[in-house]
């Protein structure tokens, strides 16, 4: 069986799709810039800091631990 690790970016994308939240709405809710979120989403920022992850999680209505990368 193949072990597939999921990154913060992949998890964020999945939740955004499930909840039908676009980048502009996530930016508004999290008070993070669209540019910063876009860099996270496309993988330019591989390890966003914990405060950023917490803001994104709160904006998506999930516990921040759901966005932490798999080990």
Image: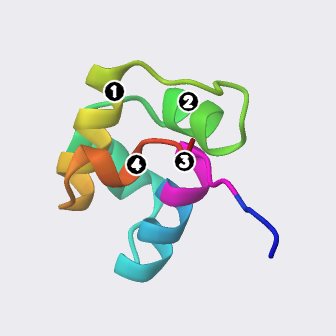
**Label 1 or label 3, whichever comes before in sequence order:** 1
Q: Which residue is mark 3?
A: 70
Is residue 45 located in the magenta-colored stretch of the structure?
no
| Residue 15 position (above or below residue 69) | below
Q: Residues within 10 Å of mark 1 (few under 14, many from 20)?
A: some
The quarter holding residue 32 reads: top left
Cα–Cα span, label 1 and label 3: 17 Å
Q: Residues within 10 Å of mark 3 (few under 14, many from 20)?
A: few
Q: Which residue is mark 1?
A: 52
| Residue 25 position (above or below residue 42) | below
Q: Is residue 10 left or right of residue 19?
A: right
The quadrant of the rendering that contains the C terminus is: top right
**Label 4 or label 2, whichever comes before in sequence order:** 2
Can you name the residue that lies furthest to the right here? 2
User: Closest to the observer: 69 or 41?
Assistant: 69
Disc tally is 4
**What residue appears at the point 52 percent right and 27 percent down from the top-left corner?**
36
Q: Is residue 11 left or right of residue 38?
A: left
What segment carries the magenta color?
5-11
Cα–Cα span, label 3 and label 4: 9 Å
Q: Which mark is residue 31?
A: none
User: Closest to the observer: 43 or 32?
Assistant: 43
Residue 1's spot in the image, x, y percent?
A: 80, 76
Residue 70's spot in the image, x, y percent?
A: 54, 47
Residue 44's spot in the image, x, y percent?
A: 73, 27
**Label 1 or label 2, whichever comes before in sequence order:** 2
Q: Which residue is mark 2?
A: 35
Q: Which residue is mark 4?
A: 67
Helix, strand, or loop for circle 3?
A: loop
């Amino acid at each position: 069986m193949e072990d597939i690790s999921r990154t913060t970016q992949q998890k964020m994308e999945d939740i955004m799709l499930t909840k039908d939240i676009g980048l502009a709405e996530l930016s508004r809710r999290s008070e993070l810039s669209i540019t910063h979120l876009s860099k996270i989403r496309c993988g330019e920022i591989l390890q966003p800091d914990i405060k950023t992850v917490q803001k994104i999680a709160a904006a998506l209505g999930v516990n921040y631990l759901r966005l932490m990368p798999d080990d």
